[in-house]
Image: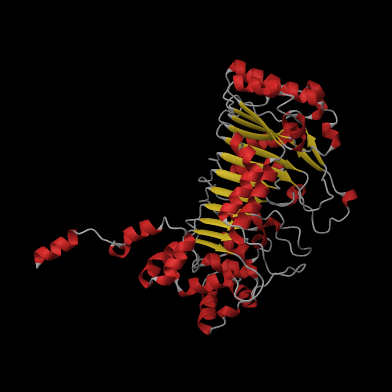
Amino acid sequence: MAEEKRRQSQRKPSRLLGCPVEVQLVILSFVPKGDLVFVSRVNKHLRKVVQPLLHKELDISCPPGNSSPLVLAIRTLLERPDLANEVQHLRLDGFDFPPRTVDVMPITPVTCLTPKRSMKKAVKVMMKSGLRYAADWATSFKRGEVDSVVSLLLVLLPKVRTIYFGEDFCIELLFMRLLLDCQGRMKPDSTLHGFEHLRHVTVRNQMATHYHDGLNFADTFRSFFHFSGLETLTISGDYPEDMMHREVMTFEPMRRLRSLDLTRISEGELDQILALAPNLKKLRYTYAWHPRREDEDYSRARTLSLNLTTLRKSLECHRTQLEHLDLMLVDDTKVRQRAIWNILLCDGPLNLHDFSSLRTLTIPWMFLAEPPFGPHTLPLRYNVPDTVETLTLVDALVFQERYWTTWDKRVVKKMVVDYLHHAQDSKTSLRKLFMVGHGFGRIWSEDEDFETYELARSAGIRFDTSSMTPTEVDNALEVFERMRRYGSKSDEACEREIERVFGRERRAGWP
């Protein structure tokens, strides 16, 4: 009898259910999420194994109407705290959202929580949170205000590592700000977790000032800098011209932060933010101004001033450690189709030659060759570090005549050719040179400038042009991603569409 049991134990399992649970988890982790849903529906045993895998990533939208996925997710997590502990990635996005009214918080029905048990559990979590305004939070939640519902969802996810806030979910941030702000907690009896596992945050709040007059949530971006454990952060700030009215940021250093993507931050305030990230390796800085809701008179649109010397001083503390630097300038935000916002560049050009660790650089042409110098501006080699391997030059401000009327395309071409000769003769690290944007797309053509392409090839450099700027490409890719997740197109259809639009850039190795 003992011998028979020994032979059975040595026999290899003939089916998935015969394997240990740990082995089943490894195998099922390679199965597409849609197939896992079907598996959980047809097999009771595998349902228990699959559910933690299905809840590892939550992709939640909030369309108008009853029983939105956002509220249903909260109901599930209230009933199953074990599944809440499995959630590592949270994405709040989607095409549909409850309709907005000016200066009114958007509302989603919470009728699916009306059974006493579910609503009582939700209110209990909020009242025990220790927030000073917990009672107001509970009242707001019962009304169905989306901000309070999302705040409760975050409280229920103690081990979340990645959070993506789509545009609709980061306009009105009231209780969420109190939740993120460590000063908003009542110590020592607070039961809120401290987001100890949170490492990656993306907040698409660039339109936070466009929807309301009296309600102002633009300054909420500061609360996200309380997370000292973050490794990557993408966020937009307030209006650059209002920088002098804000307090200096004096938060705990974010020593783990390696990648930072900032939009709508003034060049002066950038210095304060970078001081919080002593170990930063990758920075993307986009200077853009989105109109307030009341800015209807385009003829009186204010002129913004970007001081390149101040920008240089803000970047200087990281000149020996930054490896990737993307500097963007956007004067056409597509919010108002008739509006090109005036931007005045001061105290240029921007000299980055002593940034000794830089490997990838994306920068507007006007930052390196400002028009007041005209054709006598300094050669590119004096402003670009020799360590750069991939250089992308952008035709920012191409629709503002004060900058480009002084430039002849032959002068632009000569400066690029001179830089290629320098890269060839001095053995710099340059391997890829891209010139992108509508203006550069018209200047360069393979038929007319075959010698330039040959010169780059002989120097071991890949030279190419594109009519789309990095900002335009990113916006288009984000639309494709939302179509893939929430639209009617399949993954394969979206991939074909991306290849059709960006196939040339992909083959060129454009970052």
- Count of numbered circles in the view: 0
Q: Quadrant of the N terminus?
A: bottom left
Q: Is residue 49 above or below residue 421?
A: below
Q: Position of residue 428 (x, y in %)?
A: 58, 21
Q: Is residue 431 above or below residue 174?
A: above
Q: Identify which residue is drawn at 70% across, 45% down.
A: 472
Q: Which corner quadrant of the image does residue 85 belong to?
A: bottom left
Q: Which corner quadrant of the image does residue 427 belong to?
A: top right
Q: Identify which residue is drawn at 54% across, 54% down.
A: 227
Query: In the picture provided, is 55 more to the left or to the right than 381?
Result: left
In this rendered view, identify the residue nearer to me: 114 or 216. 114
Q: How is the image coloured?
A: secondary structure
Q: Identify which residue is drawn at 85% across, 34% down.
A: 402
Residue lying farthest to the bottom in this orientation: 116
Q: Position of residue 262 (x, y in %)?
A: 65, 46
Instruction: Examine the rendering and report whether any part of residue 114 can be seen.
Output: yes
Q: Identify which residue is drawn at 14% across, 62% down.
A: 6
Q: Position of residue 234 (x, y in %)?
A: 61, 49
Q: Position of residue 172 (x, y in %)?
A: 68, 64
Residue lying farthest to the right in this orientation: 299
Q: Quadrant of the C terminus?
A: top right
In this rendered view, identify the residue nearer to me: 397 or 286. 397
Instruction: Examine the rendering and report whether any part of residue 378 can be seen.
Output: no
